[in-house]
Amino acid sequence: MPFVSAAEWTPPKSVQVVVIGSGAGGAVAAARLAAAGFEVVVLEEGGHYQKRNFRMREDEAFPQLYQESGTRATKDLGIAILQGRAVGGSTVINWTTSFRTPDLVLDHWQKVHGVQEFGAAELRPHFEAVEARLNIQPIPLEESNRNNRLLWDGCEKLGYSIEVTKRNVKNCFRSGYCGMGCPVDAKQSMLVTYLPEAVEHGATVVYRCRVDRLRTDGDRVVAIECSELSEAGPTGRQLSFAAERVVLAGGAINTPAVLLRSGLGDAFTGRRTFLHPVIATSARFREPVQAFYGAPQSVASHHFAHRGERAGFFLEAAPAHPMMLALAATGFGEAHRSTMVELPQLTAHLAIAIDGFSPEETGGTVELRPSGAPVLDYVLPPRIWEALQEGLRTLVRVDLAAGAEWVQTGHDPALRISSEGALASLEDHPLGPGKVAVFSAHVMGGAMVGEVGRSVVRSGDLRHHRISNLHVCDGSIFPTSLGVNPQETIYGIAHLVSERWTQHWKS
Ligand SMILES: Cc1cc2nc3c(=O)[nH]c(=O)nc-3n(C[C@H](O)[C@H](O)[C@H](O)COP(=O)(O)OP(=O)(O)OC[C@H]3O[C@@H](n4cnc5c(N)ncnc54)[C@H](O)[C@@H]3O)c2cc1C
Ligand code: SF4
């Protein structure tokens, strides 16, 4: 019974290891533990969709593969949040950009947050292992689509450093549909790599099975309580069983939500949730850009990642499909239509703020709605608004340098800027909640690792400070954001920590 829906599954009385969530952290942990001989059950609230289901249609993919059908947002609706909800988690729908964790970030975690045993030297062999397993390799610049190439050209003209990125793909035909699930299994997501590997080693992956809460007694989890789901929602059937060890890997926002629903909330749980808040431009070029085709992301500029006392930001491109643009574009009626008709000629370029590195940047807080569903309360501090403002100004300059006829911002109503001289108009339109479209596809933190009394899980083995058989293994353990796309950091940490578990748990 390798991949089985909750409806078809009868839980055993007890299992050795239960992994909650099958994304970047959960899948790697499950594969490594199963390969080491542990009896592993993976529980996933989303469905089991595979390449035959990936029909390159946004209207099908968003309800099937995204949290809240792609409509998740912060409590004040100020920031749209994209996260996955399927077997394979967000890796099924991500855009494949892969970076190791910058050494400076790991040093910061050690010095400021007391995170020991996750240094660059300790992680290096684990990054090497996941890079080999997931075929993480640089994409040649010639294979960039025009959207990415224009970002490259604009940066080069202005003298900003820019690099090609690495991707976790094999035989990719650059369809551009990564965000809707890869239709040819070229993307080396968890769905086609570590999860099948876990199953080969005897793991069971139970999908449409949502963990509602962990029942604890003293310092131990004694039961995992779940709801069976159908495509339409909970069926009413409850499942409950015991596990010797619990690995919580529901991703940021959802992992702290499980802890809060389980009565394990404290001053740190759900806190310090970071988003890499994103501001975007759409620039019109005379020749078609077709930002919906080609590898979604293939270049990145970290020229402005370190701005001294001010928060940094980095630049990347994004795929622009009709539904995504329709949701992102501000305005109604004619104003909205006038953006949509330009789609084939438009770029989609992003300035991504790096949050969490200053005492003022405390991040968002996960709360529970009366239904038990999580919601993130994140009011961006002035430092991050300043980074977004500067990021926007930089993007407009880059787009104009690349030859754009005009550059449209995400203000409501949108501004169109067609010359360097007109850049000053941005000053008359300060950014702020509800004044401009802000997004996130990188949700991090909320169950941070660090010293006792300042964090949720401890260094070394990511064990919950109070609950001895509970570990967290996903992007929620980050004490800050990263300044690079997060998937490889999660793979590397999961690879490293599962090796430590194997050694400790076997003895
Ligand atoms: C559109 C998009 C594009 C992205 N592009 C990139 C990119 O190019 N490069 C990059 O590095 N990163 C990218 N990311 C981010 C990256 O994919 C995530 O940071 C990473 O997958 C997070 O891993 P995780 O293990 O923390 O959580 P996830 O991969 O999100 O997995 C968590 C899983 O747990 C399940 N779950 C949650 N709660 C429960 C519960 N209570 N019971 C059962 N199951 C539960 C969820 O359904 C989900 O499947 C992108 C993300 C999105 C959404
Ligand atoms: S761009 Fe490549 S990896 Fe992405 S969906 Fe298309 S074929 Fe798959």
Image (cartoon, rainbow, N blue to C red):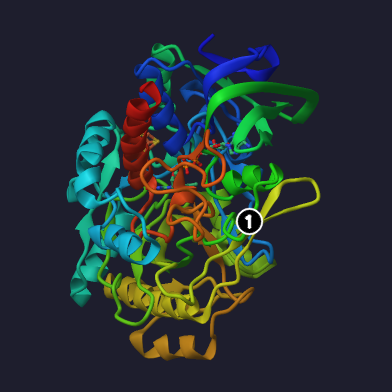
**Does ligand 1 reach within 8 Å of label 1's beta carbon?**
no
Looking at the picture, which amino acid does disc 1 mark? Asp
Corner quadrant of residue 221: top right
User: Taking 214 as reference, is 371 left or right?
Assistant: right
Q: Position of residue 194 (x, y in %)?
A: 38, 26
Q: Which residue is drawn at 42% across and 61% down?
A: 480
Q: Which residue is drawn at 31% across and 65% down?
A: 111
- Residue 193 visible in this rendered orientation of the protein: no
User: Taking 137 as reference, is 319 left or right?
Assistant: right
- Farthest residue, direction top: 1
User: Taking 393 as reference, is 138 left or right?
Assistant: left
- Farthest residue, direction front: 218
Mark 1, residue position: 266
Corner quadrant of residue 108: bottom left
Height in image: 70 above or below 451? above
Height in image: 408 above or below 83? below
- Residue 238 visible in this rendered orientation of the protein: yes
Looking at the picture, tell me which residue is in the foreground, 9 or 151. Answer: 9
Height in image: 305 above or below 275? below
Looking at the picture, tell me which residue is in the foreground, 306 or 238. Answer: 238
Q: Residue at x 29, y 57 (%)?
A: 106
Q: Where is residue 365 in the image (x, y as percent from the top left)?
A: 61, 61
Q: What element carries label 1?
A: loop
Q: Where is residue 219 in the image (x, y as percent from the top left)?
A: 60, 38
Looking at the picture, tell me which residue is in the foreground, 52 or 129. Answer: 129
Q: How dense is the environment of label 1, judged by Cα within 10 Å: few (below 14), some, or many (20 and up)?
A: few
Quarter occupied by the C terminus: top left
